[in-house]
Amino acid sequence: LAGDRDIYRALHSMAQLDQEAVGTAVQAAEQNRAEAMARLAHGLAEQDELLPGVSAEEAAHVLWVLSSFESFERSR
């Protein structure tokens, strides 16, 4: 994200303003990210790397939030 920060910011802003223009591309990227975070969380669960009581689904949600462009932007 760091290398393409301005591009991501523009795409996310444009998606909110004009869903038809770039919204589909942003939605597809977000879906791919969600699927990748679910795979990562399930892998961590299989390796017994999650805290006791934390499900793979919960971990996937946390990873999804932490890896979002919004989280990246707020951390700067």
Image (cartoon, rainbow, N blue to C red):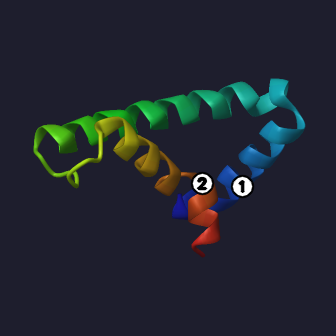
Secondary structure under badge 1? helix
Mark 1 is on which residue type? Answer: Arg
Q: Residue 73 placed where, x, y %? A: 63, 65
Query: Which quadrant does the C terminus fall into?
Result: bottom right
Kindly identify which residue carries mark 2.
69
Q: Residues within 10 Å of mark 1 (few under 14, many from 20)?
A: some
Residue under the image location 30 percent in, 38 percent down: 56
Find the residue positioned furthest to the left: 47
Would you place residue 64 above or below residue 18 in this image?
below
Q: Residue 31 placed where, x, y %? A: 53, 29
Front residue of this view, candidates 72 and 48:
48
Mark positioned earlier in the residue sequence (1 or 2): 1
Q: Is residue 55 left or right of residue 63?
A: left
Please tell me the numbered disc located at residue 27. none
Callout in the foreground (1, 2): 2
Residue under the image location 20 percent in, 45 percent down: 44
Q: Is residue 31 left or right of residue 13?
A: left
Mark 1 touches mark 2? (CB < 8 Å): yes
Q: Is residue 61 left or right of residue 6?
A: left
Please tell me the numbered disc located at residue 9. 1
Q: Residues within 10 Å of mark 2 (few under 14, many from 20)?
A: some
Front residue of this view, candidates 4 and 35:
35
Q: Is residue 43 left or right of residue 4?
A: left
Secondary structure under badge 2? helix
Mark 2 is on which residue type? Answer: Phe
In which quadrant of the rendered view does residue 35 lie? top left
Q: Residue 3 placed where, x, y %? A: 54, 62
